[in-house]
Image (cartoon, rainbow, N blue to C red):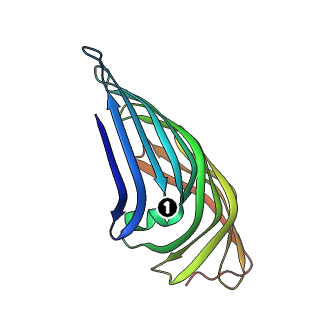
Amino acid sequence: ADLSAEQLKINDSLIGTVQISAEQNNLDPTINIGVSLTGNGNDAQVKGNYQLEKNEFDVRLDIQQMPLILIDPFSAGAIQKSQGYVAGKMTVRGTPDEPVVKGSLSFKQASTRIVYLQTRYTIAEHTIQIQKNSINFGQLQLQDLAGNKASISGDIRHNNFQTFDLFLDFTTEKFKVL
């Protein structure tokens, strides 16, 4: 089956063109899937398969470029007016109850406005590493609107994305929080 949506919008935000394909040969318990997101600054592909009998998936995500503004509609109003891009490669394997996600995401000229704090934060460039049960931030450098800098290091550990433990250090001499 194939599905295509041009000029897809979510909450009045233009996402781009989405193309989805799913293919299963007769009596084969494997569904091959492909998803692409293009247009409006997007260049992302998802390819892989889902094993029906084992309830397992093996998917590769390749994001050449995706505008960060795409996350705004999914933030429940927590952030807005995001700018910049994210790129990266990831694999997702396992079952829906025990997914294993590995890869990296790179932020380029990224900034967003935190609604609750009423301020904007910027990340010039940074890559985070995603492993089986952790998201490692390395040494993430943030900048507020006044040009003050802060550093966040450490990781977020999780149990199959069900429970989360934060092991983060925040260091700054001066930085706008509220």
What amino acid is found at the position of numbered circle 1 in the picture?
Asn
All told, the count of numbered labels is 1
User: Measured from the top left, where is residue 64 in percent x and y?
Assistant: 59, 48
SS state under label 1: loop
User: Measured from the top left, where is residue 73 in percent x and y?
Assistant: 38, 67
Residue visible at 52% across and 77% down in the picture:
113
User: Measured from the top left, where is residue 58 in percent x and y?
Assistant: 44, 29
Residue 121 appears in the figure: yes
Residue visible at 54% across and 60% down in the picture:
41
- Quadrant position of the N terminus in the picture: top left
Q: Classify 50 as above or below 115.
A: above
Relative to 11, 151 lies left or right? right
> Residue reaching furthest right?
173
Q: Residues within 10 Å of mark 1 (few under 14, many from 20)?
A: few
Residue visible at 58% across and 56% down in the picture:
86
Relative to 57, 120 lies left or right? right
Q: Classify 111 as above or below 71.
A: below
> Residue reaching furthest left?
27
- Quadrant position of the C terminus in the picture: bottom right
Viewer-side residue, 26 vs 155: 26
Viewer-side residue, 155 vs 144: 144
Viewer-side residue, 19 vs 163: 19
Circle 1 residue: 40
Quadrant location of residue 12? bottom left
User: Measured from the top left, where is residue 139 in percent x and y?
Assistant: 71, 58
Residue visible at 42% across and 46% down in the picture:
161
Residue 102 appears in the figure: no
